[in-house]
Image: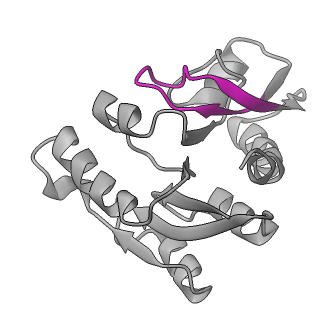
């Protein structure tokens, strides 16, 4: 049985997809957040999954927050730490601590469009497809080894929101399989 800790910042729709998939031989040990008001924490708690949070604004540095979060995560002895909408850029120390067992999902076909506003940037570039990438996290933002990718068409007249909805549906299928 693999122990998984999932990190979220908001509603945690990818976390929910992973939990609902009931991945064989996987135990969701905890759902943690950098926001005590993250909607996904309530959802996880209602299903009996341990939850906790640390507000990153209460720390004097990114490293201080990451160190405190690592202590919380390590208490669950995870085999895999899954970032599911965890909206924090992680320190090199955090990435090194979980090297090879820290997974993220990004809403673009990496290596294109790292960072934020991926769908807007895909539209501006005239792309005809968009998608998502599941990758292992390294200190370089959105540049770790790719685990899997999903692709959706960009249709004439699409907005960034249209693309986001289509990509999210693929994320919800792909992330549980990657876990």
27 left or right, relative to 171: left
Look at the image and name its color scheme.
Answer: one colour
Which residue occupies 81% across, 33% down?
158
Picture layout, residue 93 above or below residue 54: above
Residue 29 lies in the magenta-colored region: no
Q: Residue furthest top?
A: 125
Res. 170 in view: yes
93 left or right, relative to 142: left
Percent across and percent down for residue 160 are 69, 36
Q: Residue furthest front?
A: 1
Picture layout, residue 142 above or below residue 174: above
Res. 89 in view: no
Percent across and percent down for residue 38 are 44, 68
Which quadrant would residue 68 be assigned to in this image?
bottom left
Which residue occupies 45% across, 57% down?
9
Q: Nearer the viewer, residue 23 or 36?
A: 23
Q: Nearer the viewer, residue 127 or 176?
A: 176
Which quadrant would residue 1 be assigned to in this image?
bottom right
Percent across and percent down for residue 70 are 32, 52
Which residue occupies 51% across, 32% down?
137
Percent across and percent down for residue 48 are 57, 86
Which quadrant would residue 126 be assigned to in this image?
top right
81 left or right, relative to 71: right
Q: Nearer the viewer, residue 32 or 93?
A: 93
Which residue occupies 58% across, 62% down?
3
The count of marks equals: 0
Report the span colored magenta: 131-149
């Amino acid at each position: 049985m693999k122990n998984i800790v999932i990190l979220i910042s908001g509603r945690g729709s990818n976390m929910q997809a992973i939990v609902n998939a009931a991945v064989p031989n996987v135990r969701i040990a905890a759902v943690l957040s950098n926001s005590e008001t993250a909607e996904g924490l309530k959802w996880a708690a209602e299903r009996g999954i341990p939850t906790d949070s640390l507000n990153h604004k209460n720390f004097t540095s990114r490293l201080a927050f990451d160190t405190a979060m690592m202590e919380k995560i390590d208490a669950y002895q995870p085999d895999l730490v899954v970032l599911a909408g965890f909206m924090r850029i992680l320190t090199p120390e955090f990435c090194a601590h979980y090297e090879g067992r820290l997974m993220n999902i990004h809403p673009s076909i990496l290596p294109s469009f790292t960072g934020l506003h991926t769908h807007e940037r895909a539209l501006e570039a005239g792309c005809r497809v968009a998608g998502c990438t599941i990758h292992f996290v390294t200190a370089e933002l959105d540049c770790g080894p790719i685990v899997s990718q999903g692709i959706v068409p960009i249709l004439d007249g699409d907005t960034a929101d249209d693309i986001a909805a289509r990509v999210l549906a693929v994320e919800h299928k792909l992330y549980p399989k990657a876990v």
